Image (cartoon, grey):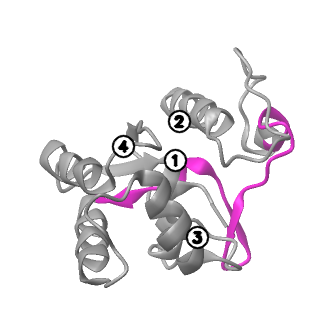
Amino acid sequence: WDPRQASLFKRLCACFASCPSAPAMVQRTESAPSLQPQSTALYLGGACPQRVADKECWPERWGITRRQLQELLRRLRRDPAWRPDNTVYDLVSDFIVPWTKGSGHSYALQVNVEAPQEVNLMVSHAWGENAEDFLETLLRSTFDQDVAFICALSLYQA
């Protein structure tokens, strides 16, 4: 557990605590206790890791790759229910939630269940922004090696 991981984890926790879909029990804090893997549940105010293959998977591995974002956008555009004017909120409520409901996995973990991806990029978004514009901007602004934590896709929404 090196200082870079602790710093990233603090940023992810801040995003998690401010996300509208996060459990009400999560408390945003200005400083964390000594960040050791066994103390992270306490730091998150009782939040739990997502479980993958019966193992705990913490936020630093809730990432989605640039290629997976491209695949998501293609999948959405092929879906007859998709509208180009959908917001990120619509994306989550009408697509992400039905695709992941009952799995206990975020979309990012669902597409990476065999090998959860370590995050190297934190992405902020607005729930009311156009989802296609958001995804296209991500594709223009990232590199192939980037693995993003995006609240809408990295947190279990169902």
Q: Is residue 24 left or right of residue 69?
A: right
Which residue is disc 3 drawn over? 97
Dot 1: few (<14), some (14–19), or many (≥20) neighbours within 10 Å? many
Say which amino acid is labelled 1.
Answer: Cys
Q: Nearer the viewer, mark 1 or mark 3?
A: 3
Under mark 2, the amino acid is Gln
Q: Nearer the viewer, mark 4 or mark 2?
A: 4
Instruction: Using the numbered discs, state the Cα–Cα distance from disc 3 to disc 4 in whole angstroms.
Output: 18 Å
Q: Are marks 1 and 4 in contact (CB under 8 Å)?
A: no
Please identify the quarter of the rendering in which residue 25 is found: top right
Is residue 61 left or right of 57 when viewed as pictured? left
Q: Which residues are magenta?
A: 41-65
The quarter holding residue 81 reads bottom left
Looking at the rendered image, the disc whose residue lies closer to the viewer, 1 or 4, is 4
Q: Secondary structure at mark 2?
A: helix
Which residue is label 2 attached to?
5
Q: CA distance from mark 4 to mark 2?
A: 30 Å
Residue 9 at x, y percent in the picture: 58, 36
Q: Is residue 52 magenta?
A: yes
Label 3 or label 4, whichever comes before in sequence order: 3
Residue at 43 percent across and 38 percent down: it is 126
Disc 4 target residue: 129
Q: Which residue is mark 1?
A: 151
Q: Could you tell me which residue is drawn at 61 percent across and 29 percent down? A: 14
Which of label 1 and label 2 is nearer to you? Answer: 1
**Disc 1 to disc 4, how far (Cα)?**
14 Å
52 versus 119 height, above or below: below
Secondary structure type for disc 1: helix
- Report x, y in % for residue 132: 26, 57
> Quick one: label 1 or label 3, which is nearer the N terminus?
3
Vertical side of 154 occupied by 28: above or below: above
Give how far apart the Cα atoms at labels 1 and 2 are.
18 Å
